[in-house]
Amino acid sequence: MKGVTRLRASSLLVGLALILGACTSSQSGPASSTSTFGFVPAADATRSPESCGATPAYQGSIPAALVRAAANNAPKVPYIIAQPPTAAAFIFSLPLHAGAAANSGNKVIWVTATEYSTLEIEGTLPGAAPVHYTVPALWQAIHPSIDVPTPGCWRFTVRWSGQSAAIDIRYR
């Protein structure tokens, strides 16, 4: 009887080891680009004083994953990484200006970690009328002007291919 109990216990331990082994990742080392961890700021990037909300703007070096996601055309301008970090925005002129005329030059390039055919961008600020943009593109979307009616820290929800992420951008 003791032999049967040991056999069952051994089988249970082997089965448990196999289950636990299947639940762990086979990757080693840090995520290199847009894995499940998404985009991360470059190690030597500095936080911009124009940051607001939960997603700071960064200046300086651009992480390699963002350069690749921008088809190696990443501009040398401040960038903001979304939450979750599966999207980012390159901001061409900080600060951006609220209440400006259409096509004011509040230029933003939106980048996602995965392909999309349509990018939906909705901006909200408590007490202000929301803004909405639809951009048909793949991998990156250059929108000539992301204009808002009121100054403040705007929350932009970006939606594509069943995914969404949020980016906070200050307008003066």
Image: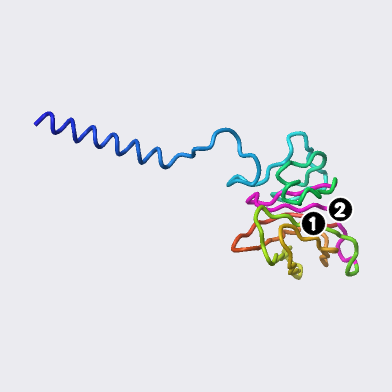
**Image coordinates for residue 70, horizontal then vertical, percent:** 76, 51
**Mark 2 highlights which residue?**
92
| Above/below status of 138 relative to 7 | below
Residue at 18%, 30% (x, y): give it.
Answer: 6
Which scheme is used to colour this image of the protein? Answer: rainbow
Q: In front: 40, or 69? A: 69
Q: In front: 44, or 9? A: 9
**Image coordinates for residue 134, horizontal then vertical, percent:** 73, 69
Q: Indicate yes or no whether the magenta region holds residue 71.
A: no
Residue at 63%, 51% (x, y): give it.
Answer: 84
**Image coordinates for residue 59, horizontal then vertical, percent:** 82, 42
Quadrant occupied by the C terminus: bottom right
* SS assignment at label 1: strand
Report how far apart the C-alphas of labels 1 and 2 lie in the structure. 8 Å
| Above/below status of 5 relative to 118 | above
Q: Main secondary structure of the magenta part?
A: loop
**Mark 1 highlights which residue?**
109
Please state the extent of the stretch shown in magenta in the rendering: 77-100
Residue at 15%, 33% (x, y): give it.
Answer: 5
Query: Residues at badges 1 and 2 in contact (C-beta under 8 Å)?
Result: yes
Q: In the image, is 13 to the left or to the right of 93? A: left
Of mark 1 and mark 2, the one earlier in the sequence is 2
Mark 1 residue type: Ile
**Image coordinates for residue 2, horizontal then vertical, percent:** 11, 29
| Above/below status of 10 relative to 125 | above
